[in-house]
């Protein structure tokens, strides 16, 4: 293992969280650059990169900006670097990444042209296309356009968060008092309700696409025909606003009402980033910045001709399956049928579902069956993010209509999904579902469901516990574990969690589940300490974890303690990692890798060697301060030996990835793991693993 001497590292022991996040997004950008990724998928990764960046500025940059404005240094919270330094480094890093992403986009567009796919602008429109575009503009675009003449306004209009605008400058034929041509300014909001990419008619077996922005540019004479101008130009701008919700304290209003109002007001948050087309003229840029009150604590990013590249996530497929990832059919779980009674099977043994390699339909099937089963009395579930069209919510409403006592803990402050959750909360409430809106001061982030069924005059409990959301849409692209179990001890402890939601001044005790905010931190410390003691005693030791983020400094210190004691620590961290691995005297026994590929790596898995009797947990909790101390999270033990082996196998497959895995280090270079072993692309290998499990099950 490559190691760095601790004296060579800056005096802090941690990587800054925000800068580490930018390195994660750089890994996403690598997928857009990777020539082995299908062309249209590469464009979509550029969209993901851009979408991630938007959310980063709304949340993390805005938070650091508030620290600076409060006159605080923030060094202790930010890993030894001041808040002002972080803001500056973020801006410089993002400018470089944006430039890189533009270069990647240019190279992809050249490759698309080799495939007879052309993305054209308003200067490249043929006569045939001109006719189509004019009709398209009149019928679809013009009615949706919002055009504001800002020169005439005393007060500058409030621009929508992350909306894209064309800043239009008209040099008029009319002169002002100085004898100079008068300048008129306008803003055109790019409509979000129209597809950003307009597919034009094919010509000579060539496919053409024009961005909506350029289609609008081509119609400037149509839009501003009433003005007598000499020349006209249009450049894109965008602002990103602070996304923090401000929950009012009006006791007379329901929590639903407060969140609804707060979400509506989010669009008025302070600007934190201003992005503009770098080819814009200085006069227009200065006019806009002065009018908008953009200041030195905002991130000012000169960009390309187009913003909101997140829209590339929805780049049209054009019928070109050869330029997309092959669609892979999710596999069944061996022994579980979507046709037979699922509760009867779970009564016999535990089952593990690993989506999207295996079908998420079992979760919906579980709830639909419980909704109809006359012996089922109660259903309790936590909901964090629902799909736009949610079969989960429909099943719960169906259960309530069938007389079941349905309790739903729904998190109304799941960032950027508040509106969808509010909509479903109101719908479920009307249909008789009992709603719980969490615990004051805590987000409920755990993913669990318990069904109580009367069998032989006794209540039997059936549960599922997951590392990810109960969301049919994200389950197609997020990798997550879900455990189905009828273990009564786990079921009883899940009931304690639901009791805590309603009577949260009573702290429950648990013998099986590890529950935040009261127990996760100390229990993980205890488990890590046990590995240290085992190693000192000459017993087998080791820690394996798969996480989305690792940023809690105290938890990192505990892992450093394990490394110093000689415990081998293997970490797979998709996103933020503030731990610095491979430092002599601090972390030489820790290795961290990150996998970015076709699917979004999302499960949390903890494995402790425990002197030869390993302990396994799947969890909703990352090792971040908020998950350990400020959220309700559940880590669930895995007792079934076959499932334990499955978790060990899937971790080992990911750990052996030498195609899409990157090494996390203090070098910030996101170097790919390359070795002489046979190629292992873990996400593809995992699908093969589950195919083989099905074959083995069929033989027996």
Image (cartoon, rainbow, N blue to C red):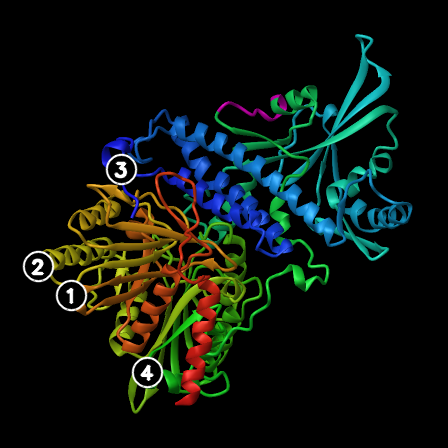
Q: Nearer the viewer, residue 695 or 471?
A: 695
Going from the N terminus, do you reach mark 2 or mark 1 first?
2
Identify the mark at residue 349; answer none if there is no mark: 4
Residue situated furthest top in the rendering: 178
Task: Using the numbered discs, state the Cα–Cα distance from disc 1 to disc 3 in whole angstroms.
Answer: 29 Å
Residue contact between numbered discs 2 and 1, judged by CB atoms under 8 Å: yes
Q: Which residue is found at the position 79% from the left and 37% from the top?
A: 217
**In this view, the mark in front (1 or 4):** 1
Judging by the rendered image, the residue that carries numbered circle 1 is 611
Q: Which residue is found at the position 83% from the left and 57% from the top?
A: 205
**Residue 199 picture location, percent across and down:** 77, 53
Vertical side of 388 occupied by 15: above or below: above
Judging by the rendered image, the residue that carries numbered circle 2 is 537
Disc 3 element? loop
**Residue 296 picture location, percent across and down:** 50, 23
Q: Which residue is found at the position 52% from the left and 73% from the top?
A: 330
* Magenta-drawn segment: 290-296
Going from the N terminus, do you reach mark 4 or mark 3 first?
3
Disc 1 element? helix
Going from the N terminus, do you reach mark 1 or mark 4 first?
4
Residue contact between numbered discs 1 and 4, judged by CB atoms under 8 Å: no
Judging by the rendered image, the residue that carries numbered circle 3 is 13
Going from the N terminus, do you reach mark 3 or mark 2 first?
3
Task: Using the numbered discs, state the Cα–Cα distance from disc 2 to disc 4 in whole angstroms.
Answer: 36 Å
Vertical side of 390 occupied by 487: above or below: below
Task: Using the numbered discs, state the Cα–Cα distance from disc 4 to disc 3 in whole angstroms.
Answer: 45 Å
Going from the N terminus, do you reach mark 1 or mark 3 first?
3
Vertical side of 175 occupied by 265: above or below: below
Please tell me whether residue 687 belongs to the stretch shown in magenta. Answer: no
Task: Using the numbered discs, state the Cα–Cα distance from disc 2 to disc 1 in whole angstroms.
Answer: 10 Å
């Amino acid at each position: 293992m490559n190691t760095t001497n601790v004296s060579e590292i800056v005096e802090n022991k941690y990587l800054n969280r925000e800068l580490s996040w930018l390195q994660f997004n750089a890994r996403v950008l690598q997928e857009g650059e990777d020539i082995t990724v299908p062309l249209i998928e590469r464009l979509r990764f550029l969209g993901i990169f851009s979408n991630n960046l938007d959310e980063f500025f709304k949340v993390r940059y805005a938070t650091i900006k508030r620290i600076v404005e409060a006159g605080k240094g923030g060094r202790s919270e930010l890993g030894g670097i001041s808040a002002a330094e972080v803001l500056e480094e973020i801006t410089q890093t993002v400018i470089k990444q944006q430039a890189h992403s533009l270069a990647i986009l240019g190279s992809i567009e050249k490759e698309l042209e080799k495939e007879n796919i052309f993305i054209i602008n308003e200067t490249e429109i043929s006569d045939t296309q001109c006719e189509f575009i004019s009709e398209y503009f009149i019928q679809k675009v013009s009615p949706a356009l919002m055009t504001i003449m800002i020169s005439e306004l005393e007060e500058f209009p409030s621009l929508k968060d992350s909306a894209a605008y064309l800043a239009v400058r008209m040099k008029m034929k009319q002169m002002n008092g100085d004898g100079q041509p008068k300048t008129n300014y306008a803003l055109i909001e790019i409509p979000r309700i129209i597809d950003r990419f307009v597919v034009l008619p094919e010509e000579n077996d060539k496919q053409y696409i024009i961005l909506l922005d350029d289609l609008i540019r081509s119609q400037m004479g149509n839009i501003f025909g009433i003005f007598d101008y000499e020349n006209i130009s249009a450049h894109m701008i965008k602002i990103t606003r602070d996304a923090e919700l401000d929950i009012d304290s009006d006791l007379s209003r329901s929590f639903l009402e407060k969140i609804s109002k707060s979400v509506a007001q989010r669009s008025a948050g302070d600007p934190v980033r201003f992005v503009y087309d770098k080819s814009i003229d200085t006069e227009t840029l200065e006019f806009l910045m002065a009018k908008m009150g953009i200041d030195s604590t905002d991130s000012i990013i000169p960009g390309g001709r187009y913003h909101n590249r997140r829209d590339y996530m929805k780049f049209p497929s054009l019928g070109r399956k050869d330029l997309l990832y092959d669609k892979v059919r999710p596999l069944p779980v061996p022994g579980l049928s979507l046709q037979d009674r699922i509760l009867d099977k779970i009564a016999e043994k535990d089952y593990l579902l690993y989506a999207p390699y295996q079908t998420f339909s079992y979760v919906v099937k579980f709830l639909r069956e419980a909704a109809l089963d006359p012996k089922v009395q109660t259903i309790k579930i936590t909901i964090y993010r629902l799909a736009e069209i949610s079969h989960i919510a429909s099943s719960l409403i169906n259960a309530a209509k069938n007389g079941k006592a349905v309790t739903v803990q729904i998190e109304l402050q799941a960032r950027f999904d508040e509106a969808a959750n509010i909509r479903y909360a109101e719908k479920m409430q009307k249909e008789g579902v009992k709603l719980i809106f969490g615990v004051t001061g805590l987000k409920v982030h755990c993913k669990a469901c318990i069904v109580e069924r009367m069998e032989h005059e006794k209540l039997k409990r059936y549960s599922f516990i997951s590392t990810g959301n109960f969301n049919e849409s994200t389950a197609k692209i997020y990798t997550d574990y879900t455990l189905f179990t009828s273990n009564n001890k786990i079921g009883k402890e899940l009931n304690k969690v639901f009791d805590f939601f309603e009577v949260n001044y009573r702290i429950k005790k648990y013998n099986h589940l590890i529950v935040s905010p009261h127990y996760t931190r100390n229990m993980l410390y205890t488990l890590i300490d046990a590995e240290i003691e085992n190693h000192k005693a000459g017993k087998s030791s080791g820690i394996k974890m798969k996480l989305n983020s690792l940023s809690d400094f105290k938890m990192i210190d505990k892992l450093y303690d394990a490394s110093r004691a000689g415990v081998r620590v293997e970490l797979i961290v998709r996103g933020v990692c503030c731990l610095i691995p491979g430092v002599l005297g601090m972390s030489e026994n820790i290795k961290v890798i990150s996998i970015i590929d076709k699917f979004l790596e999302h499960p949390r898995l903890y494995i402790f060697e425990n002197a030869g009797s390993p302990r396994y947990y799947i969890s909703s909790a990352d090792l971040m301060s908020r998950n350990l101390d400020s959220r309700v999270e559940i880590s669930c033990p895995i007792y079934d030996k076959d499932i334990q082996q499955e978790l060990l196998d899937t971790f080992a497959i990911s750990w052996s990835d030498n195609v899409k895995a990157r090494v996390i280090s203090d070098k910030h270079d996101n170097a790919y793991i390359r070795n002489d072993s046979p190629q292992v692309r873990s996400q593809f290998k995992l699908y093969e693993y589950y195919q083989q499990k099905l074959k083995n099950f069929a033989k027996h």
